[in-house]
Amino acid sequence: MNLKEELLNKIRENKEVIGVIGLGYVGLPLAVAFAKKGLKVIGFEKSKERTNLVNNGENYIGDVKDEELKYSVSNKFLEATTDFSRLKECDIIMICVPTPLDIFKKPDMSYIETSCIDIGKNMKRGTFISLESTTYPTTTENFVKPIIEKESKMKEGEDFWLCFSPERVDPGNKTYKTENTPKVLGALGQDAKEIGIAIYSKAIEKIYPVSSPRAAEMVKILENTYRLINI
């Protein structure tokens, strides 16, 4: 059995371990969305304060229901850690770190870069990686992929898979949350697309695959532009 089929079998049997890097307003709701379905989720955070809050079942994000976080933690579906070496335990890794604008009004890529280095140094073969952080078109292929390949000495499409599936969080929205907000997914290759749909479909109602990561990245830019104009 090849790596892809091994991973798809794990997903079918609910035996996959999901890692979420960054437990902010994007990462924590996403982690809870999977954990409350009974899936094993490990949240990775640089902040010791946040990891302690999560592990104590204490909520700090408005879009997360207190009882869902407590349920996920008390039933051992969700835990948080500052130990990034535990990325090797994960079959799926989702990058949900911020990309704030720097003084030149360009996205600060340092958080994504650090996450990719941590992933490359620690991940195992057969891992599916999804970037959710808002960024510019070509980031997944020209920025994320080379870093992970260099650090891991592995090859995308053979040893691991990569996609871009932008977060679509609308903080404070009473109607649309993580689960019922349609999600775009642009993967590098058919295998990555198949795995991405299989995993995201467990927690999110509608998945819209597009032709490539850069198409998904462009979708996010257009959405943010439209939102900004409306505001």
Image (tube, rainbow, N blue to C red):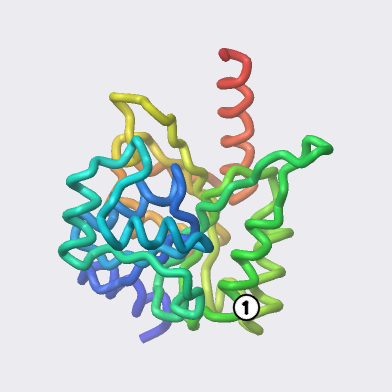
- From the top left corner, tell me how far across and down residue 69 is, in percent: 24, 51
Q: Which residue is mark 1?
A: 155
> Which image quadrant is residue 38 in?
bottom left
Relative to 57, residue 81 above or below? below
- Quadrant in the picture for the C terminus: top right
- Does residue 96 appear left or right of residue 4 in this picture? right
Amino acid type for the residue under numbered disc 1:
Lys
Relative to 210, residue 22 above or below? below
Is 75 or 231 nearer to us in this picture?
75
Work out which residue is located at the far top of the displayed protein and give it: 230
Is 113 or 131 nearer to us in this picture?
113
Residue at 65%, 65% in the rendered image: 114
- The reply to whether residue 198 is visible in this rendering is no
Residue at 23%, 44% in the rendered image: 66
> Which image quadrant is residue 103 in?
top right
- From the top left corner, tell me how far across and down residue 147 is, in percent: 70, 70
Is 160 or 117 nearer to us in this picture?
117
Is 37 or 59 nearer to us in this picture?
59
Relative to 137, residue 174 above or below? above
Instruction: Assess disc 1: are there few (<14), some (14-19) or many (≥20) residues with their C-alpha within 10 Å of its C-alpha.
Output: some
Work out which residue is located at the far right of the displayed protein and give it: 104
Query: Which SS class for mark 1?
Result: loop
Residue at 25%, 73% in the rendered image: 15
- The reply to whether residue 125 is visible in this rendering is yes
- Does residue 145 appear left or right of residue 26 in this picture? right
- From the top left corner, tell me how far across and down residue 18 is, in percent: 36, 66
